[in-house]
Amino acid sequence: MGTATAGRNSRATAWHNWAGTVTATPARVVTPASVGELQEAVRRAAEDGLKVKAVGTGHSFTAAAATDGVLVRPQALAGIREIDRAAGTVTVAAGTVLKDLNTALAREGLSLTNMGDIMEQTVSGATSTGTHGTGRDSASIAAQIRGLDLVTADGRLLTCSEKENPDVFAAARIGIGALGIVTAITFAVEPVFFLTAREEPMGFDRVTAEFEQHFAENEHFEFYWFPHTGNCNTKRNNRSQGPAAPPGAVSAWVEDELLSNGVFQAVNSLGRAVPATIPSIARIASRALSARTYTDIPYKVFTSPRRVRFVEMEYALPREQVVEALRELKSMVDRSGLRISFPVEVRTAPADDIALSTASGRETAYIAVHMYKGTPYQAYFTAAERIFTAHGGRPHWGKVHTRDAGYFAGVYPRFGEFTALRDRLDPDRLFGNDYLRRVLGE
């Protein structure tokens, strides 16, 4: 009996995302062991009148993958299929987790050019929602795609690239699961290289005044502002000759535990229980930072473990408007009675050519706001979203937002191109759900 068959008969169990903000109870769950089994599962769902959604590791904060129909778990479709050193590409199955891809590439002396700050997601989940890091010249993970395979609503397997089905390729690199189920992705890769990271505390007024200078002078610039303080932490990553010189034990502990995990968890739990303590904690935490410099291969510099659970909203703004929007955000927090225990993250991306990319057609900067899991976030996010949308912001497809198709038609010049392609590939909305109905329309 094939895995898909076993999956068809599996008892429906509730699924929830990483943050615990979305739950769904699918009619059945399938775990296809081959592309053929996945195609069969899609055809059978259509026959049974059930919707189909693929889910990765659930790191989206939206209900993009939620369904009461057939939930496809692609984790068995994993691993590197082919490395083409002459073309500078690697082809991987869609259920491959980014961590496994990064470590496998490093063993082969290869690397992605840029990546986000965590690597727990599957490659298909991360790219479908537009996951990105920060970069002056290098863009999101999806922008590094050179080809992909897609199972469409009629069970066909479409191979897409700039040469083959280019209209689908132009959109499906960030498809939010609306066009079909991605089964394999070909990424551009390059010989592994070293990055030297310089982390340095800096005042809010200085970092915002000098933002364009820092952006211009560094391949990868980002910073975090600690609400209720005038303090930021900046991070500049640039290529270097090496050799590897990872962070020392003490500075690694400060970054990994104080700011990201164990101690940070305890601090957030205290803040949730006694919100009045948050401003004092923020001042102490932001002052605990000191400058440090370290060098390593890309994934060890770009990414770090994140064990503290949170809820996140992130908006992409025209880069020239990000400083003004951030100052408005700080002013709003300072005036309000809000108590925010998570830093606000600012990153950048160059313009790209993907229809629904948050950086589509424009130089972009991102502002991400977070709240500790279990803390009421609506008031903060609503106020932040009002600021971001006033600047023509585009929300991250996998993070909390309240925008709908009417709004997106105004901020994405190629929105109609995407929805027309969806009408052609999935006229009966086999891959639809409530979230896609809201963001893409009927």
Image: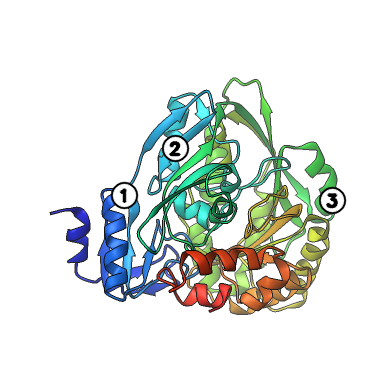
In-front residue for pair 130/195: 130
Secondary structure under badge 2?
Answer: strand
Residue bearing the label numbered 3: 206
Q: Quadrant of residue 87?
A: top right
Residue 49 - label: none
Type of the residue with mark 2: Thr
Q: Residue at x 66, y 78 (%)?
A: 406
Q: Residue at x 53, y 61 (%)?
A: 267
Camera-side mark, 1 or 2: 1
Q: What's the distance in space between the residues labelled 1 and 2, CA to CA? A: 15 Å
| 172 w.r.t. 432: above or below | above
* Residue 119 visible in the snapshot: no
Residue bearing the label numbered 1: 35
Q: Quadrant of residue 40?
A: bottom left
Is the N terminus in the top left, top right, bottom left or bottom right quadrant? Answer: bottom left
Neighbor class of circle 1 (other Cα within 10 Å; few <14, some 14-19, many 20+) is some
Q: Earlier in the sequence, mark 2 or mark 3?
A: 2
Residue bearing the label numbered 2: 91
Residue 290: x percent and y percent? 68, 41
Q: Earlier in the sequence, mark 3 or mark 1?
A: 1
In-front residue for pair 338/66: 66
Describe residue 128's horizontal placement relative to residue 139 as left or right: left
Residue 295: x percent and y percent? 61, 28
Q: What's the distance in space between the residues labelled 3 and 1, CA to CA? A: 53 Å
Q: Earlier in the sequence, mark 1 or mark 2?
A: 1
The reply to whether callout 3 and callout 1 are in contact (CB within 8 Å) is no
Type of the residue with mark 1: Val
